[in-house]
Image (tube, rainbow, N blue to C red):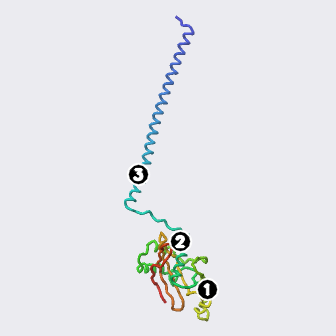
């Protein structure tokens, strides 16, 4: 018996609808499985990230605990060049006022660590370290580094008194004339106690200890050089120790 056209179309439509539903269900299952895998992968990544962060946290915590247990103090930062320059002038002022009672000074315009200039700095510093106690190694190291070469002194230093910077050429001119050189010197600089030579100042990291060389000549066969250790207390520098390195 032949089925009519309407019944046939109805059966075909049912099959099409069923296939559509089955195909949709299959696609849904694939999407669902994909989402499950994505969740699993995301969970694994999160656990890995959390584990890494936790390990970093433990490393930092362990370092802090070890430092606390060993009592290791935090390192003191090195003072800046500006801080050392300001303290250097304060050390010069304290040193000069402790050595002389003068209203003005004549200071060589370049630094030195002995009567021969800078050539014997290392050996002189070793001799000084053997004859001076309680010198911070940082202070000695700073002195060595800051006196690796001769440096010009600034003409605008605040030393608490008037001063003149004397060049080597000017000194040679005074003492090369056919006259008594020291007499000529004191005619030009009547208030000066002689000619003073300074080194750069070495400091410890807290700027509470300073080491400096000072040489003084006031006449023929009337001179001496010292390494001077100063300490800072209540904001003021005072001489702690001094070691003579030469005399004439």
Q: CA distance from mark 3 to mark 1?
A: 67 Å
x, y percent for residue 187: 61, 91
Q: CA distance from mark 2 to mark 3?
A: 40 Å
Q: Which mark is residue 58?
A: 3
Q: Which residue is mark 2?
A: 84
Near mark 1 (Cα within 10 A), the count class, few <14, some 14-19 or many ≥20, is few
Kindly state the secondary structure of the residue where label 3 is placed. helix
Apparent side of residue 145 relative to residue 65 in the rendered image (left or right): right
Kindly state the secondary structure of the residue where label 2 is placed. helix
Outermost residue on the top side: it is 1
Q: Nearer the viewer, residue 104 or 166?
A: 104
Q: Which residue is mark 1?
A: 170
x, y percent for residue 152: 58, 77
Q: CA distance from mark 1 to mark 2?
A: 29 Å
x, y percent for residue 85: 55, 72
Which badge, 1 or 2, is on the more N-terminal residue? 2
Q: Quadrant of residue 111?
A: bottom right
Q: Is residue 8 above or below residue 62?
A: above
């Amino acid at each position: 018996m032949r089925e009519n056209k309407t019944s046939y179309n109805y059966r075909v439509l049912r099959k099409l609808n069923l296939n559509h539903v089955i195909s949709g269900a299959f696609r849904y299952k694939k999407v669902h499985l994909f989402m499950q895998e994505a969740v699993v992968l995301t969970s694994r990544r999160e656990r890995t990230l959390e584990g890494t962060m936790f390990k970093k946290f433990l490393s930092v915590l362990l370092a802090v605990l070890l430092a606390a247990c060993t009592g290791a103090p935090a390192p003191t930062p090195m003072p800046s060049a500006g801080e050392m320059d300001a303290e250097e002038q304060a050390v010069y002022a304290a040193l000069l006022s402790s050595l002389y009672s003068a209203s003005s000074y004549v200071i060589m315009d370049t630094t030195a660590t002995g009567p021969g200039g800078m050539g014997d700095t290392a050996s002189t510093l070793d001799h000084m370290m053997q004859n001076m106690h309680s010198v911070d190694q940082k202070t000695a190291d700073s002195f060595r580094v800051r006196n690796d070469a001769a440096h010009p002194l600034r003409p605008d230093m605040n030393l608490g008194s008037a001063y003149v910077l004397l060049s080597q050429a000017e000194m040679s001119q005074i003492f090369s004339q056919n006259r008594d050189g020291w007499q000529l010197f004191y005619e030009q600089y009547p208030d000066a106690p002689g000619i003073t030579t300074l080194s750069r100042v070495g400091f410890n990291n807290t700027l509470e200890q300073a080491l400096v060389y000072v040489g003084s000549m006031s006449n023929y066969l009337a001179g001496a050089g010292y390494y001077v250790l100063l300490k800072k207390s209540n904001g003021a520098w005072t001489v702690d120790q001094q070691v003579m390195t030469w005399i004439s």
